[in-house]
């Protein structure tokens, strides 16, 4: 089977809710990422055969085919097609999988996988909330689904608390992890570790090049002072991912395209895995998904040099490490979503951009990325830096 290569991987710096990127229409923000992928690679824009773009809240400014609208807002010719996909928080990681599968199958040679989410302009929950307000239907879960699982709704907050309970994680552990995320992100930002992956956007006061969610002065005391999300629980807004605006993208090509367009690969996609599990605990699925990916890839966890495990809530990477016996020194080395933000549909390609460049900066070989996703899903991608 043909190989799939990553030639470019970029992201915007995250913007806080109603922060520096709130003035950017999501189509324009994604368009800037598409432009950067083509410009930095030196690729003829006409060579792009498809754009696969992930987005979770496809309503309002993210409705009416945000993938196509991102192309129309970019410098790509309007002959470049696009598709919008939703695998919840794993949307743009799945976009990478679809792009790689297209290339590996020989169907296409040059595909962009991308993601966008403006959580300021299209707040989380808007698609469900607007429909409910308009009196349209009973919501996404039918009586049959609710009866099957014995719940009235499926909640990420409930799932994250269930994970914490199952793995006996307390508030102090979650807060300590959250602090380390901010500390690693702050150190990376100060050292310029994100420079090669960032796409600067014009905002009031200049160019936006620093993730707005990083708390450079974070302490255990400040994190611990934040109110718990529920009485008797261990989750708080400070040990969970931040609401974030952002866009990201990865240029995936075939070996033939490398030669034809004289492109230099950054990494090779070694394995792609996606699994489904219990939709109630929901966010535990990266654990069995990682086990399956390692088995299918012929690698052991100790062969993996760096891991990117999305910090939807601190309980998720902590449970993942505990269950798999992972080395904490290899996990989210430049911080994660607790500090850098979680722009939903953009997070998958965002993490990939960080992983690719972190591996290359350290002279390491294998990287693994995984995401917990609504509905009890998880994607895993293993790459080899070149």
Image: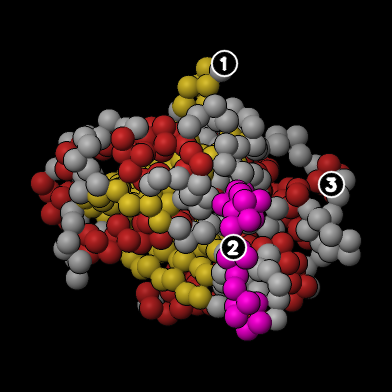
Nearest the viewer among 283 and 326 is 283
Q: Residue at x 53, y 50 (%)?
A: 57
> Most extreme residue toward the left, as rendered?
260
Circle 2 is placed at which residue position? Answer: 137
Q: Which residues are magenta?
A: 124-148
Q: Which quarter of the picture shows residue 184?
A: top right
Q: Is residue 324 visible?
A: no
Residue shown at the point (54%, 40%) measured from the top left: 118
Please check the rendered image and state whether residue 143 is part of the magenta-colored stretch, yes or no.
yes
Asked if labels 1 and 2 touch by Cβ distance under 8 angstroms, the answer is no
- Alpha-carbon distance for marks 3 and 1? 30 Å
Crowdedness near tag 3: few (<14), some (14–19) or many (≥20) residues, C-alpha within 10 Å? some
**333 versus 11 height, above or below:** below
Question: What numbered label is drawn on residue 205?
Answer: 1
Q: Are marks 2 and 3 in contact (CB under 8 Å)?
A: no
Question: Does the residue at mark 3 contact the one at mark 1 (Cβ under 8 Å)?
Answer: no
Query: Which quadrant of the rendered structure holds the N terminus?
Result: bottom left
Label 2 crowd (10 A; few <14 / some 14-19 / many >=20) = few
Place residue 70 in its image quadrant. top left
The front one of 20 and 269 is: 20
Q: Which residue is mark 3?
A: 226
Q: Earlier in the sequence, mark 2 or mark 3?
A: 2
Whole-number angstrom distance, CA of label 2 to CA of label 1: 45 Å
Question: Which x, y percent locates residue 377?
Answer: 52, 70
């Amino acid at each position: 089977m043909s190989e799939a290569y990553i030639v470019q991987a970029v992201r915007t710096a995250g913007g806080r809710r109603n922060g520096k990127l709130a003035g950017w229409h999501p189509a324009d923000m994604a368009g800037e990422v598409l432009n950067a992928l083509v410009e930095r690679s030196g690729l003829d824009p006409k060579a792009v055969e498809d754009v696969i773009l992930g987005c979770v809240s496809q309503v309002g400014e993210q409705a009416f085919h945000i993938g196509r609208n991102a192309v129309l807002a970019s410098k790509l010719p309007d002959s470049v097609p696009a598709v919008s996909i939703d695998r919840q928080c794993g949307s743009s990681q799945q976009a990478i999988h679809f792009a790689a599968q297209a290339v590996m199958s020989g169907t296409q040679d040059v595909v962009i996988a991308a993601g966008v989410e403006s959580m300021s302009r299209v707040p989380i929950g808007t698609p469900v909330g607007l429909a409910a307000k308009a009196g349209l239907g009973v919501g996404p879960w039918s009586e049959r689904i609710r009866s099957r699982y014995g719940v009235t709704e499926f909640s990420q907050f409930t799932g994250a608390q269930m994970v914490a309970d199952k793995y006996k994680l307390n508030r102090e552990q979650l807060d300590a992890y959250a602090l380390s995320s901010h500390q690693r992100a702050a150190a990376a930002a100060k050292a310029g570790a994100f420079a090669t992956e960032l796409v600067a956007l014009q905002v009031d006061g200049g160019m936006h090049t620093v993730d707005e969610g990083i708390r450079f002065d974070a302490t255990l005391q400040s994190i611990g002072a934040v109110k718990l999300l529920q009485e008797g629980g261990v989750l708080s807004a400070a040990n969970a991912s931040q609401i974030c605006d952002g866009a990201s993208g990865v240029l995936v090509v075939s070996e033939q395209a490398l030669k034809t367009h004289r492109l230099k690969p950054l990494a090779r996609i070694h394995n792609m895995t996606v699994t489904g599990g219990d939709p109630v605990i929901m966010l535990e699925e990266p654990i069995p998904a990682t086990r399956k990916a390692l088995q299918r890839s012929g690698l052991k966890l100790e062969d993996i040099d760096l891991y990117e495990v999305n910090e939807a809530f601190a309980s998720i990477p902590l449970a993942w490490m505990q269950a798999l016996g992972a080395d904490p020194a290899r996990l989210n080395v430049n911080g994660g979503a607790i500090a850098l933000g979680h722009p939903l549909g953009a997070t998958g390609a965002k993490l990939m951009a960080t992983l690719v460049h972190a591996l290359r900066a350290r002279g390491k070989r294998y990287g693994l990325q995984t995401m917990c996703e609504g509905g009890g899903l998880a994607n895993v991608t293993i790459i080899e830096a070149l």
